[in-house]
Amino acid sequence: QVQLVESGGGLVQAGGSLRLSCVASGSIFSINVMGWYRQAPGKQREFVAVIGSDGSTNYGDSVKGRFTISKDNAKNTMYLQMNSLKPEDTAVYYCNARGLKGYWGQGTQVTVSS
């Protein structure tokens, strides 16, 4: 089993920045890929960014050039640096880990005011 705990969400004005963190614990050796997803009220969960075990990254079209995903293997922590935030970025952001199974964190709320 893998446990994921997100933090770093909050309220920010449009144009501002936030950094989300996701700490993984448990059977982390089984994880191949980690990523961030988000879900706004009344909408489906949306892909934000992913990082592979080799450090390769991929981003959703709506966040390219504004968000940066990274990880610190020594701290078992993944980050999402979010810059130039827009009101449409408002959502609950979820950490995801994939290996033999898929795991989700509990989510952290990000609210961007206009």
Image: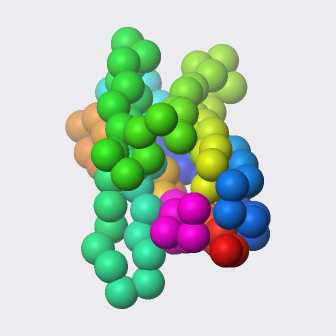
**Numbered-mark total:** 0
Q: Position of residue 40 (x, y in %)?
A: 44, 75
Q: Which residues are magenta?
A: 86-93
- The outermost residue toward the left is 100
Residue depicted at 26% across the width and 45% down the height: 101
Residue depicted at 69% across the width and 74% down the height: 113
For residue 9, above or below residue 33: below
Residue depicted at 32% across the width and 61% down the height: 46
The reply to whether the magenta stretch includes residue 90 is yes
Q: Is residue 27 left or right of residue 71?
A: left
For residue 105, above or below residue 39: above
Q: Is residue 90 left or right of residue 38?
A: right
Give the colouring mode of the picture: rainbow
Which picture quadrant has residue 42? bottom left
Q: Position of residue 49 (x, y in %)?
A: 40, 41
Relative depth, front residue between 12 and 4: 12
Relative depth, front residue between 67 and 49: 67
